[in-house]
Amino acid sequence: MKIGIKLISAMLFLVLIIVVMGYVLTLQVKKTSLLLNERLHQNISSINQNLQLKDFSKYFLYYDEKLTQSARNYIHTQEFQWKDKYYDAKKYLDQHLLAAKTQGNTDDNLLLENIFQINSSLRTIEKQILDFIDSGQKEKALNLLNSDNYQSLKKSYTENFSAFEKQISKKLSDTVYSYQQQMGEHKRHTQEVIKSSEYTVIIISLISLVLALILGLFLTISISNPIQQLKEKTQIISEGNFDTLIQTRSNDEIGELAASFNSMTQKLTKAINKERESIMLEATAEANQKKAQELDLLNKKLLANDKRLQKANQDLAKSKELLADQIQKLEKNNKSMMGREMRIIELKEENKKLREKINKQL
Amino acid sequence: MQFLTKIQQSYKGLLIAAVIGTFSVFIAEYSQQPILDPLLLALVMGIILNSVIKFNSSYTQAFSMAPGLFIPIGVIFYGAANLNFSKIYSVEPTNILLIIIVAIIYILTILILSSILRIKDKTCFLLVAGSAICGASAIAITSKSIEAEPDDISKSLIPIFIAALIGLFIILPFVNTIFRLTNMEYSVLSGTVLQFTGFVKAAVSNFSAGIQNVALSVKALRYMGLLFLIPLFSSISRGRFYIPWFLWAFLCAGIVFSLLPADITDQLRPVFKIILSFLWSMAMAAIGLNANIRSLFTKSGLCSLIISVLAFIIAVSIFLAGLLLGG
């Protein structure tokens, strides 16, 4: 891997750790926010529901009073406007009761069912009262309105309504209390999340620090060690030792540089060896030439000596011939002239001298 | 003038590249198969033709010239058609972080594996761009910015295509069966790890339009990675800080088309995509016509395939780990 790619990989690795940290923190924040939203939604909808029920309960009492009052007014005045008002109020009360039933839970509906039944009984009596008035039986209508049954139903309606209102108020305060509790819990949870996020940041920062140090160290070693080695080897080469090689396994630019350096030293060693060889060859050739010249000179001398020797040999041969002639003559003379011994002795001496001369010449 | 003379001299070669490019765009368009990438088709057709016919030097010169001519022009259309900064807001922040994590893992895995398997730097850069960003398109842009050889392109694009096929038809369905991902999770996974946009479309084709849109938005986010990778790779390959001019054009086109009203961009983007397909398919055809088919069946070609598949598996694993962490 090239140095640049190594460095970029290291940087990317550190960026990766930072992004992972960001991802973990975002997930924690997202979870907390989702939980808060869910709890908020639950509590707010519960509070809204109870507030609405409370509102409805107010209407139950209001319309019930309005109905009784309208019936009473109709008895006393016999004006149809009260009858109309009665039916309007009845319509609204029924609507609110139905709406409350859809909003309420099981406990609410149990009480609402009671209110429904009492309401139905009250309305039946009131219907009879209205019918009595329409048929001109005012006394009967008044008696029915003041009857114990009607009054006890009214009392029961009010009691049930109070119970319902109390229940709603309790539910509301319970919800608010639970909301407060949950918010307190959520506050603690959020604080825990913040604390754990802080620890996450610290832990990941420490891991990043350690990894950054390891990566930095690894990069420093992988980059500076071969450079240091290269420097040392260069120094060794500068001292004239060319048999030195750098051992490296890295395939980056420094590895390539080391390979080039090794190739350079090998080539340098080869070139120097070649130079040495050529110098030695030159020296040998020079010596050989000198020796050849010396040999040539010797040869020439030998040739000259040879010529001289040949001449001497020729001279010797001539002398031999001359000597042989002389010997023949001497032998002839010896044979013919015995008395000439003295002369022969002289000749012998001459011969001896001549031999000595030849020997000297040789 | 010199440029026109060059064009005149090499018009036959350019014409061959144009014919192959156009043909591959038509095949891709009329087949209606999202996995048939016109760029890849053009490259493969170019390689096959080059192995059958021996082109003389005037043709090969034209084939060398074509990518330099068509890719930069295509980059502008690519920025306008695909670089949509407003898509950032349509993806959840946690998903954006997960996409970044997966992209970094893709890059690191390919860099490390390429170093171990001794893949050429330029092939490695193309493998990174093609896998982590967007298949053939990212390879086309990156190849121009790092001045890659045709063999580097074929050795990166074809293995990535094979890895994407394995991913789409084997790995992702297997993962879905094991982990029982929701449609939304599967679409985010497809957009995050699949290399080709066509493959992402194919992966989410059975889902609702809303979910398909999420997958394509996630994929669109990955295009932005080119803004970081191209300066990085072109600087490393040149040994000095370098930003190619067409990257600025890509960025500007992206910004302009992110700011323009949607009714205008919605009309222009499909047209730009077609023009882009034509331009880059011609460039890829020319690259294929200059590439050596034998280089694909070398040790480095096989290593590129191994790297692409392993990087895909690791990216999927990291995504699933992130998903499990998020609950």
Image (spheres, grey):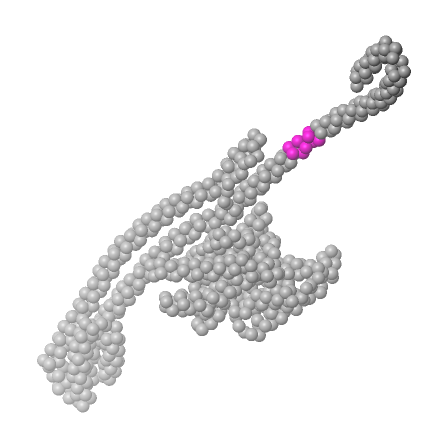
Which of the 4 image quarters holds residue A352? top right
Relative placement, left or right, of B227 versus A297 is left
Q: Nearer the viewer, residue A92 or B251?
A: B251
Q: Position of residue B4 (x, y in %)?
A: 73, 59
Q: Is residue B12 visible?
A: yes
Q: Residue at x 18, y 90 (%)?
A: A135
Q: Nearer the viewer, residue B128 or B244?
A: B128
Q: Is residue B95 visible?
A: no
The total number of labels drawn is 0
Q: Is residue B207 above or below residue A290?
A: below
In the picture, which quadrant includes the C terminus of chain B? bottom left
In the picture, which quadrant includes the N terminus of chain B? bottom right
Q: Residue at x 13, y 75 (%)?
A: A156
Q: Position of residue A147 (x, y in %)?
A: 10, 81
Relative placement, left or right, of B39 versus A321 is left
Q: Does residue A283 belong to the magenta stretch?
A: yes
Q: Which residues are magenta?
A: A276-285
Q: Is residue A123 above or below residue B307?
A: below
Q: Position of residue B295 (x, y in %)?
A: 58, 59
Q: Position of residue B117 (x, y in %)?
A: 50, 54
Q: As drawn, which residue projects farthest toward the bottom?
A: A135
Which of the 4 image quarters holds residue A270? top right
Relative placement, left or right, of B247 versus B206 is right
Relative placement, left or right, of B159 versus B97 is right
Q: Residue at x 61, y 54 (%)?
A: B147
Q: Does residue A62 belong to the magenta stretch?
A: no
Dominant secondary structure of the residues highlighted in magenta in the image: helix
Q: Is residue B82 above or below residue A56?
A: above
